[in-house]
Amino acid sequence: MSKVMLEVNGLTTKYITRFREDVYAVDHVTLKVEEGKSLGIAGESGCGKSTLALSLMGYYFAPLHYTCGDIIIDGKNISGMNPDKNISGMNPDVVRKTILGTEISYIPQAAMNALNPTQKIINLVEDVIKAHDPKVSKKEIRDLARERFETLGLPQEVLEKYAVELSGGMKQRTVIAVSVILLPKVLIADEPSSALDVTSQKMVIKMLRDLMEKGFIKSMIFITHELPLLYNVTNDIMVMYAGQIVEKGNAKETVFDPLHPYSKGLMGSIIVPESGLRDVKLAAIPGVPPNLKKPPEGCRFAERCKLVRPECKVHSVEYRTLESGRGYRCIFSEAQLREAYKNG
Amino acid sequence: MKGYRKYFANKLLWFLVTLVAAFILNFTLPRLMPGDPVAGIVARLAQGMTNTSGIQAIYQQYADLFGTNKPLVAQFFIYMKNVIHGDFGFSFSQYPRTVADVLKSAIWWTICLQFPAIIVGWIIGNTLGALAAYLKKGFDKVLMPVSIFVSNFPFFGMAVIMLVIFGVWLKWFPTSSGYGFDLIPNFSFKFIWSVFIHYQLPFWSLVLIAIGGQAIGMRSMSIYELNADYVKYSRFLGIKDWKIIGYVFRNAMLPQITGLALSIGTMVGGALIAEIVFSYPGLGVTLLHGVMGQDYPLISASTLIITLMVLSANFIIEILYGIIDPRIKAAQAD
Amino acid sequence: MKNTLQQVFHSGKFLVGFCIFVGLLLFVFIYPLLIKGPPLQIISQGTFFPPGTYVNVYDSLSSPSYILNLDDAAAKRIASKLNEDDRSAMKDWLVAFGIPDSQIDTSDTKSLIDLWTANFDPKLQLEGYTNAKRNYYVRLNKNLAGLLSTEGAIIAVKNNDTGILEETNTVAQTDYVNVNEVANVRVLPLGTDNFGRDVLTELVKATVVSLKLGIIAGIIATVIGLALGLLAGYIGGRVDDVIMFFTNLVLVIPQIVLLILISFSIGQEKRGVTTIAIVIGLTSWVWTAKAVRSQVISLRNRDHVNLSKLSGHSIVHIITNDILPYIASYVVMAMILQISAAILAEANLSLLGLGPRTTDVPTLGLMMNWAMIYQAHVLGKWWAYMPVLLVIAMITFSMNLMNTGLDHVFNPALRD
C-alpha cells in the first residue's frame, strides 16, 4: 500500500451570492491519491471541479467560503488554509512558504493568461523560488531553471522571453514547468489542454506524464471535461456532477464500463478512444445541471437520467462503495444498472 | 539602447509629421475662414483705411515680413522661414514690442506652471486611484464620488473656487498675476518668494483637477489588473502579496502613461483658461490680450507655440513609455 | 430593447444623473413661463446688486400701513447699524476711558449703548488718539443719537407754488407694510450682474442656449465620428490607414488651438451661437471616431456579419442592419459625453473672448466671461459666477453620471 499523498474527506465549500444565498459548489467530496498515481476528475462545466481545485489550494476569497472537511497532504492537515487570514491557526506566511508551491501546486485553466505580461519567465521563477527560500542566489536559480527546462524539453531561450513572445502551447508548458519548480507532492492540473490544438495537447500530456515518471511530482490531479482523454493519462477517474462525486474507479473500468447513468452518457458512443485525440467529443446529454442554490431533493441527476424512477426524486442518494474499490452514487445496484444498459 | 532604435525612429518620424501638420494648419486655417484676418490686413493696407499712421506702419511691416501680396504657397515658405528665425513680426496690440518678445516672457510662466502641475497631479492621482483599488471599502467609497465630481468640474471652475476661498475669503494667497505689483523681476529673495506665493493658487487648482481625472482611471485599471489571472497564479505559487501588488500597479500604470500623452492637449487647453482667471502672466493671458486687441500675429504665434509645446510633451512621454515598458524593448530585440 | 431600458433605469448612477439633468431641464423650461421679461434686459442702474427681495420704497410709503409692536424691533434696528468693528471700537474707547474690561459686553447692545451714552464725551482727549480717530468717534456718537430716538420720520412734499416743504405724512417706527400690498416688488434670487440684468432669468436663458449649442455640436461631432469610425473600421486597409492617420493628427493638436484659430478668424460679426456650435462639433469628433472604429473592428468578423456578406448584401445594408444596432449603445454614450464637452468648450472659448456674439443671447460661458472681466470673483459678488459655475458643473456631472451608468449596463465587465 503506497503512501497516500492527498486525502480529502468530506470537503464542502460554498459560494455566498449577492443575495446571501449559499451555493454548495463542492458537496462532501472525499478522495484519495496515492504516491505515483494520478487521479482524473471529469464533469461538465459548472459541476464544481474547478471550485474543488481552488478549495484544495486554499483559495478562499469571498464569495467562496470553506465550510467543513479535511485536506491532508502527505500527513499534513491543511484544511481551511487560507493564505490571507489566520484560519485554522496557520500563519499566512507560513502557509505561503511551506505549502503553496512546495506541497501542492496548481496549473490554472487557460494558463496562457496566467503569466504577467511585463515579466520575463526567469524573473517569475526567481520570485517563486525566493518566496520559499530567500537565501538562494540568482545564479543558483538560473542554473536550476536551465537544467529543469532542458529536462522537460523546453528550449532555454524561453527563460529570457516575455509571455507575449511565446506560442500558446509553449506558454502552457512553461507554466507547467514553473508550477513544479519546487517539486510539489501534489500537482493539480486544471484543464491543461482544453485551449490548445491537437499537437500542443499531445506535448502537454506527454510532459505531465514525464513529470510523474521522473518523480518531479509525486501525484497528480487532472481536471477536464473530456472524459475519454483521461484514459491514457490517469490511473483513476472520478466523475463529478452538480458538486457531488457520482462515480469513482480506475481509468479502464470508468471509461469502458461506466456504472452511473451520467458517466454512461458522457462516454456517448465511444468504443475505442485513441490516446490524446480529440475526435471523440462528449455526447450531449439533454438538459442542464440543477441550480445549486436550491439543490433538488433526491438525486441531482434525476431530471436528465434515462433510468429515472419516482423514488429517485424523493430521497437523497448515498454514495455506494463496491468491494472492488469502485464507487458510485445511485439507488440502483450494480446488477440493476448493467441490466438496464444491456437493454439499451 | 540599440534595441530601441526602431521604436524611437518611429516616434520621431511621427513627431516631425505632426509638427509639419501643425505648421500647415496654423497657417491655413485662418486664411480659409470667412473673416480671414490676413486678407483683412491686406485690405486695410490697400485702402489706407486706418486710424492712425502708426497702425498703417504696423500693417505694412507685417505685409513686408510675411509677403501677403504673394501667392499662398510662397507665403507659406516665407512663414516657415520666419518662424525658424523666431521672427513673428510686431505685435499689433503691444507695439513696439515684437511678438517674439511678448511670447518669450509669457512662455516660461506657462511651462513652469502647467507641466509640473500636470505631472504632480498625475502622480498623486494615480497613487490615490491605486490605493482606492487596493484598500477598497472605506477609502474607496469616499474617493470615488469625490473624484467623479472633481474631475467633471471645468478647469476654470476649480480655479475660480480656489481663488475665492483661499484668495478672497481667507486671504492666504494673492489673487492675481505672477508676482507683486511693486516688484521688478530680479533674482533677489524677495522676488523669488513673491513668485512662489503667487504660484501656489494656480498650481494647486491645476493639480486638483488633474488628480480627479487620473484617480478614476487608475482605479479602474488597478481593479482590472488585480483581478487578472496572473495575480491568482502568483498567489498559488506562494509569492508574497506585496510583490504581486508591485507588479499589478506597474502594469496598471502603463496605460495611464499613454493616457496622459493623449490628454495633455485637453489639459493644457483648460489650464490656459485657468491662467486667465488668475491673471497669471502666461500664454493664456497673452491670448486673451491678443483677442481683445485683434492682434493676429500674436494669436497666431501663441497658438503655434502652444501646439509645439503639446506635441513635444507628447513625444517625450512616448519615448519615456518605450523605456519603461519592457515589452517594447523585447519586441525590438528580435 | 425594453429589457435594456429596464436595466438602464435600474442603474443607480444613471438614475441620479438622469434625475439631476431632468430636474434642471424642468426648471429651465418652467421658469420662463412664470417670470416673463426678456433675459437681457437691463433692470438695474449700477452693478452687482446682491440677491434679495427689492421693495419699491416710494410705493411702500403709499401702501396701507399696519402697526406691529415687536419687542426686538428697536434692538434689531440698532444692531443693523452697529457692526462688529464699531462695537470693538466703542469698547476700546471705554477701556481707555477707564471702565474695567469685564464690565463691557459688546454683544449686549443695550448695556453697551447705556455705558456709552453715560460716559462718552466728544471733547475728551484720550492719549494716543489721532485726530482722525477722534472724528470717527464723534461721528459714531452722532449716528447713535439718531438710532436711539423713538420718533418717526416725516414725509414732506415740495409745494410747487411756494417752494416750501409741506408735511404730508409721518412714518412711525412701528409702521409695517405688507409686501404683497406694495405695488412694485421684485425678487432677485440671484441679484444682478455687472450690466444690471437679473441673474436668475439670464441664467435660465443661458442654460437653454448652452444646451442647444451642446446638442448641435454633439450631433455634428457624433455624426462625423460615427461615419469615419464606421468607414475606417469596416472597410479597413488603406481607407483605415488614411482615416486613422488623419484622426491621430487632429487628436494631438489641442482642440482649443483649432477653436481659437477658427473662431478668431471668423470674426465677431459672424460668430453666432449656431456657428460656434458647428465649429465645436467640427473639432471634437476624434474620440467618437476612435471608439466606433474599435467596436466595428471587433464586430466585423462576427458570424452574423459574415452571413450577411455571404448572402450578398451591399455594404450599406450590412452596416445599417448588422453593425449599427450593436454600436448604438456606444454612440449614445459618446453623444452624451460630446454634449457636455461641447458646453465646456464653449465656456472656454467665451472666457477667452472668442465666444458667441454678446448682444443677442447669453450663454453660460458668456456669463462667466462677464463676471471675470468685471472682477466679480475678487469683489466677492458670488452670485454673478457661482450659480453659473454650479449649473455648468451640474450639467457635466449629471451627463457623466448617466454615461457611467450606461457604461455599467453595457459593459458588465466593469462592474466591481
Image (tube, coloured by chain):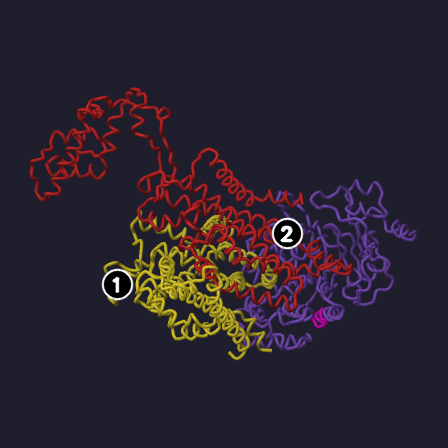
Q: Residues within 10 Å of mark 1 (few under 14, many from 20)?
A: some
Disc 1 target residue: B191
Instruction: Give percent across and percent down for residue A336.
Output: 88, 49
Q: Quadrant of residue B204?
A: bottom left
> Subunit of mark 1?
B
Q: Which residues are magenta?
A: A206-215
Mark seen at residue B220: none
Which residue does the image show at 78% across and 45% down from the upper left?
A299
Residue A190 or residue B319, whichever sits in front: B319
Letter of the chain shown red in the rendering: C
Q: Quadrant of residue A39?
A: bottom right
Against B41, residue A296 (above or below) is above
Against A40, residue A47 (above or below) is above
Disc 2 target residue: C328
Disc 1 on helix, strand or loop? helix
> Subunit of mark 2?
C
Instruction: Give percent across and percent down for residue C256.
Output: 46, 59
**What's the magenta bit mostly, secondary-structure-wise?**
helix
Letter of the chain shown purple in the rendering: A
* Gap between marks 2 and 1 measured at Cα: 58 Å
Instruction: Give percent across and percent down for residue C240.
Output: 63, 66
Residue A37 or residue C386, whichever sits in front: C386
Which residue does the image show at 66% across and 60% down from the upper left?
C298
Instruction: Locate residue A9 relative to residue C123 in the image: left or right.
Output: right
Q: Quadrant of residue B211?
A: bottom left
Q: Residues within 10 Å of mark 2 (few under 14, many from 20)?
A: few
Q: Nearer the viewer, mark 2 or mark 1?
A: 2
Q: Is residue A208 visible?
A: yes
Letter of the chain shown yellow in the rendering: B
